[in-house]
Amino acid sequence: MKQKNLLMLLCFIITTISFLGCSYFDSKNNIGNNTEKETTSSKKQSNVGNDPVKLKFWCDEDEMELFQEMIQAFVEEHKNEASIEVTYEVNGASGCKDALLADLDNAGDVFSIPDDQLLILVAAGILEPVINGTEIAERNLEGAVEAASVNGVVYAYPITADNGYFLYYNKKYFTEEDVQTVDRILEICEKNKKKFIMDWSSGWYLYSFFGNTGMTVGLNENGLTNFCNWNSTENSIKGVDVAEAMLRIAASSGFKSSSDFPKEAKKKGIAIVSGVWDINAIKAAYGEDYGAAKLPTYTCAGQQVQLSSYTGYRLLGVNSYSPYREWAEKLADYLTNEDNQNLRFERADRGPSNKNAASSEAVGEVPAIKAVIAQSEFGSLQKIGQKYWTPTTEFGNTMAAGNPNKMPLQDLLDTMVSAITE
């Protein structure tokens, strides 16, 4: 296969993202309408003759065993059509985009990605419209299909609808009523010399404090830069109000900013903001006292404000440069069907994106899945440019440390917003 020049590829990405961005947010009412793109042929046609079909599969280490089981069933099902050989490589979803761009020639044919990587992979030409986009749109939840689409065209296969965050708590210390507010959570943590854990070093979680205040952040139509008014002095809830609320939380002996949620759960963390990826660690730490709920409200500008969240979805992508793309598409379609999403739920507590699987009674009985669904009412799909992350980390760390240099809060907010929107 022709080697890809990374510099040229990145230039192409920037140009294409700008083009895509102009109508990126028009997709909601057109999802699944792949029209002519739905029948686009692969760059290299599948070889299903005497030679084996060789596919490479990428996913996270903790999901590999179950995926292998499902893939072997796929191979067996199609053994009379082709000799399919699958190579398995651990390549985590969070770093998949970078791995693909760095070495496309050796990339996976089918790979797992979070939804926020979709746009750049489409812009790079690594993802093309899926062959059966209308069917995929019909069988999955609306939010999942929106996350897998650009301009109303489906580019990937939704597999979970649980890539958001919520509150885990230890029922030994809290009632369901206690976990409705941050104030009460901190009060109980202080009394018991325990901790409420949330990662303020990540803009993903920092969004929680601003998301339901009337202030906004998001991606401009050019698909590259951001808009943000978190430093607003005009809204009924101002940026300074949020910063002051965060400092009050940080001053509590019952609060700690940390990203090592499993470790904290084993130590003093009895209320933790995280997602389903930590469910096994939380269960191990809390045992029968494991509980989960939507995020609590926090006191801001004299009122209770519901903590928001970024909702997220996990997708399977198919490398458009795969020499066996048609078989790669069939595999991705198979792995994300209703039966296999049910299997992933039963074996790994992963929340399905498939409509039928997601509506099952069993799914509704899992505390973590119930919590992520309840929180989704107060969440937003993450559509944000790269300039967002560093300034939110700096601001969050400053708040968690209690603003040690006593900088004026408006100055800190102005600096953050200026960098986000640069």
Image (cartoon, grey):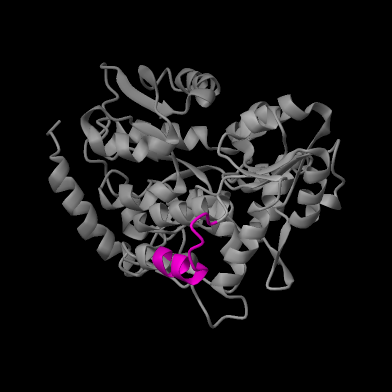
Magenta extent: 403-416
Residue 239 coordinates in the image, percent (x, y)? 54, 71
Q: Can residue 149 be found in the magenta stretch? A: no
Q: Quadrant of the N terminus?
A: top left
Is-magenta flag for residue 415? yes
- 318 up-or-down from 60: above or below: below
Give x and y (percent) for residue 87: 36, 18
Q: Is residue 42 visible?
A: yes
Q: Give residue 57's quadrant in the image.
A: top left
Describe residue 214's horizontal placement relative to residue 228 as left or right.
Answer: right
Residue 260 lies in what quarter of the image? top right
- Image point (53%, 57%), residue name: 403
User: Which residue is found at the position 57% from the left and 75% from the top?
Assistant: 238
State the image coordinates of residue 175 (x, y, percent, origin top left): 87, 46
Q: Nearer the viewer, residue 302 or 326?
A: 302
Left or right of 160, for residue 85: left
Q: Residue furthest bottom?
A: 234
Q: Nearer the viewer, residue 136 or 319?
A: 319
Q: Is residue 155 visible?
A: no
Left or right: 102 in relation to 361? left
